[in-house]
Image: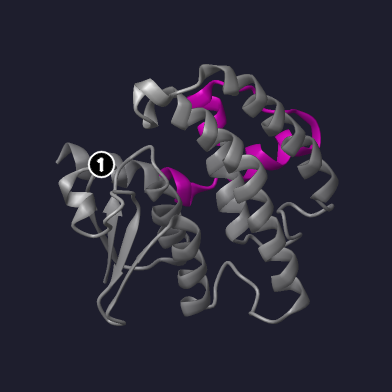
């Protein structure tokens, strides 16, 4: 059984979502970012953290965790070294750099950084970068239902989570059209709803 260390409305949602998609057994240890509980697993205080006792592994960073789970179980990913995996990893990196980067910079200057070093003037630039990334995403999406065509993969989890972050966290509107249809499709997957509900219930327990 895996242990997921994390909290609702954080990147832990991504990991819980993937665990739900693959039907893995896991438990949740609620730990807000920068809490003592989080620091017990990750000295940076960031969540999520995944503990895999069978492998003797404790791993942080949501993208690294998703990649590890995909490779370990052979699901939601293409095999390493294939052209498909190259394209998949390119989409993953694009999401992290261009989409999440804009969201995280805006978040840091809203609440994450010490107040004395925040720069609210950076937020319009972040919004510009996010909108530009959404326009680029439209050119990168093919005709299939998912980012990689017919197969649901790790980038879909990342794009959908960032869309929720943009809409509910930063209050940035999402695009319509092809990108809007795509994001709506992946954001309504039952596994995401189960993951969010389970994280909330663990905190409430």
Q: Residues within 10 Å of mark 1 (few under 14, many from 20)?
A: many
Say which element carries label 1: loop
Q: Nearer the viewer, residue 141 or 20?
A: 141
Viewport quadrant of the C terminus: top left
Can residue 146 be seen here?
yes
Q: Residue furthest front?
A: 116
Which residues are the magenta region? 164-193
Tell me, yes or no, whether the highlighted magenta stretch contains residue 106: no
Q: Does residue 160 appear left or right of residue 177 in this picture? A: left
Q: Is residue 79 above or below residue 119?
A: below
Q: Is residue 30 above or below residue 149?
A: above
Q: Position of residue 200 (x, y in %)?
A: 28, 39
Q: Position of residue 154 (x, y in %)?
A: 58, 60
Q: Does residue 51 appear left or right of residue 18 in this picture? A: left
Label 1 belongs to which residue? 32
Q: Is residue 37 above or below residue 104?
A: below
* Colouring rule applied to residues: one colour
- The residue that appears at 28% across and 49% down in the rendered structure is 45
Question: Principal SS element in the magenta part?
Answer: helix
Q: Position of residue 107 (x, y in %)?
A: 47, 30
């Amino acid at each position: 059984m895996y242990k997921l260390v994390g909290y609702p409305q954080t990147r832990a949602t991504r990991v819980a979502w993937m665990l739900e998609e693959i039907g893995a057994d896991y438990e949740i240890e609620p730990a807000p970012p920068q809490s003592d509980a989080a620091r017990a697993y990750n000295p940076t205080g960031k969540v999520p953290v995944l503990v895999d006792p069978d492998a003797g592994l404790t791993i942080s960073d949501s993208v690294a965790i998703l990649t590890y789970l995909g490779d370990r179980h052979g699901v939601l990913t293409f095999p390493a070294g294939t052209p498909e995996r190259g394209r998949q990893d390119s989409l993953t990196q694009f999401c992290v750099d261009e989409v999440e980067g804009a969201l995280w910079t805006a978040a840091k200057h809203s609440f994450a950084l010490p107040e004395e070093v925040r720069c609210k003037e950076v937020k319009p630039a972040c919004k510009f970068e996010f909108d530009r990334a959404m326009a680029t995403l439209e050119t990168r999406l093919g005709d299939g239902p998912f980012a990689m065509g017919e197969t649901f993969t790790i980038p879909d989890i990342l794009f959908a989570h960032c869309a929720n972050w943009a809409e509910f966290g930063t209050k940035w509107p999402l695009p319509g059209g092809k990108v809007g249809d795509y994001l709506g499709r992946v954001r309504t997957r039952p596994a995401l709803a189960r993951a969010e509900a389970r994280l909330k219930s663990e905190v409430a327990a």
